[in-house]
Structures are given as C-alpha cells and as structure tokens.
C-alpha cells in the first residue's frame, strides 16, 4: 500500500531528476527507480549493489555477477510484474530500447539517461512492475 501523499512524493522525485546530472552508480535509471521504490516501501532494493560501480562497464559487470542479463530482469525479484496496460502512476517500467528502468507518471514513463530525464509513452514499454 502506498503512503498518504505519495503523489506529492512522486512529483518531487521527478522534479529532482530534471536538474540532477546522470552519473553511473550515483544517479542512473536503476538507482533512481530503486530510490523511488525505497521512498514508498522503506526498503532499498539496490542495497546489495549500490556503490559498486561508477561506469557503464562496471554496471554491466555487477549485473552479470548477480546473474542478470538486463536491468529489467533485476526488477523482477523485488516487485510483482503486471501487464503494461495496467501500470499506474508510480509503477516501474522497462525502457523499450535500452531496457533501463523508469517510473510511470500517467501516459508517460520517465527515465534517467545520459541526456537527462527523458520520457516515453508508457504503452511502448515492454514490461511493468507494481509498486505499493
């Protein structure tokens, strides 16, 4: 269950990402999404691998060492998968091109990328997970 006021928390989480520069291992799509999950649940799904990479290559190595082939696969042990069509604001989405993780906010899903905060129509995303 989501805490009271989660809508304001989501708005603040999205707004903060607009001005924060991308940085592997500090502010990337997976950590940003994990921070959102932690905000709602009080549990950090990235606790085991946070701070263990600082480049794309190191991130890929950490992912492989955990036995995963994509960032989207990393979400599965932490959140229940849902049909994309049932995703709602605040749910986690997989990017349709690079498989990174982002957050649904209505008709768009937002992703932290090296170009900044980007958005994609959520229906274009191949996978979704419920948060709360």
Image (spheres, helix red, strand yellow):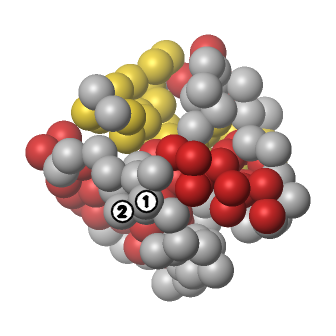
User: To which quarter of the image does residue 35 belong?
Assistant: bottom left
Q: Residues within 10 Å of mark 2 (few under 14, many from 20)?
A: some
The reply to whether callout 1 and callout 2 are in contact (CB within 8 Å) is yes
Residue reaching furthest to the right: 67
Residue reaching furthest to the left: 19
Residue at which label 2 appears: 26
Task: Name the residue located 38 percent from the left edge and 24 percent from the top edge.
Answer: 119
Disc nearer the start of the sequence (1/2): 2
Quarter of the figure with the N terminus? bottom right
In x, y percent, where is residue 103?
48, 43
Q: Nearer the viewer, mark 1 or mark 2?
A: 1
Q: How far is mark 1 from mark 2, CA to CA?
A: 8 Å
The answer to which of 62 and 18 lies nearer the viewer is: 62
User: To which quarter of the image does residue 13 belong?
Assistant: bottom left
Task: Name the residue located 65 percent from the left edge and 32 percent from the top edge.
Answer: 99
Question: Is 16 on the left-hand or right-hand side of 44?
Answer: left
The answer to which of 101 and 105 lies nearer the viewer is: 101
Find numbered disc 1 in the image and state the secondary structure of the residue it sits on.
loop
Question: Is 2 on the left-hand or right-hand side of 10?
Answer: right
Q: Residues within 10 Å of mark 1 (few under 14, many from 20)?
A: few
Find numbered disc 2 in the image and state the secondary structure of the residue it sits on.
loop
Task: Name the residue located 43 percent from the left edge and 59 percent from the top edge.
Answer: 54
User: To which quarter of the image does residue 128 belong?
Assistant: top right
Instruction: Name the disc covering residue 54, or none.
Output: 1
């Amino acid at each position: 269950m989501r805490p009271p006021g989660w809508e304001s928390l989501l708005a603040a989480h999205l707004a903060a990402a607009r001005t924060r520069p991308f940085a592997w291992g500090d502010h990337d799509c997976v950590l940003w999404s994990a921070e959102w999950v932690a905000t709602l649940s009080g549990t950090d799904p990235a606790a085991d691998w946070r701070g263990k990479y600082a480049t794309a290559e190191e991130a890929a190595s950490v992912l492989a060492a955990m036995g995963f082939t994509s960032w989207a696969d990393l979400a599965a042990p932490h959140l229940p998968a849902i049909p994309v069509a049932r995703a709602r604001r605040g749910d986690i989405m997989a990017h349709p091109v690079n498989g990174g993780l982002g957050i649904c906010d209505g008709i768009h899903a937002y992703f932290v990328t090296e170009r900044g905060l980007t958005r994609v129509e959520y229906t274009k995303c191949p996978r979704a997970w419920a948060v709360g």
